[in-house]
Image (cartoon, rainbow, N blue to C red):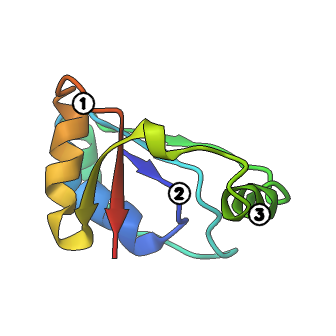
Amino acid sequence: MIDALGSRQIVELALKSLIKKMGKLVVFGQAAEGEDATLDLFNLLVDEITIIPTLINPFTTSQAIRLLEQKKLQVEPLISHTFTLDEAQKGFDLHMESVPGTEKVVLRP
């Protein structure tokens, strides 16, 4: 699973219920300085979850958004499935199960 928001709630939800045994959580969303997340160390160890923190360049996000708004990046061909937030588990399941034809899964509010 990838957290692109930098949200404490997303990280906690991912660790609690979305990541399966031996799963990975990549965190590259920019959280506020000092923002804490709670995690269950026992389940982290028993389920052998890997947390991979990454640092993104904060100066590229606005440029990427601008390119998307100007339609200079064609991302639609990469999107194979779209779900609402209430259907998020379906999207994660498709991704985790490597269902043929699944490229990028988008969650929309």
Judge by depth and name the residue closer to the eye, 12 or 95: 95
> Which residue is the site of mark 3?
66
Look at the picture and state if 63 lies above or below 20. Answer: below
Q: Is residue 84 visible?
A: yes
Q: Secondary structure at mark 1?
A: loop
Judge by depth and name the residue closer to the eye, 60 or 77: 77
Q: Residues within 10 Å of mark 2 (few under 14, many from 20)?
A: some
Q: Which x, y percent locates residue 60?
A: 81, 54
Q: Which x, y percent locates residue 18?
A: 21, 53
Q: Residue at x 36, y 55 (%)?
A: 106
> Which residue is the site of mark 1?
22
Q: Position of 62 compared to 102: left or right?
A: right
Q: Which tag, 3 or 2, sits closer to the chain's start?
A: 2
Residue contact at pointers 1 and 2, CB within 8 angstroms: no
Q: Secondary structure at mark 2?
A: loop
Comparing labels 3 and 2, the label whose residue is closer to the camera:
3
Look at label 2 and name its amino acid. Ala
Comparing labels 1 and 2, the label whose residue is closer to the camera:
2
Look at label 3 and name its amino acid. Arg
Q: Position of 26 compared to 20: left or right?
A: right
Q: Which x, y percent locates residue 12?
A: 33, 65
Q: Residue at x 24, y 69 (%)?
A: 84
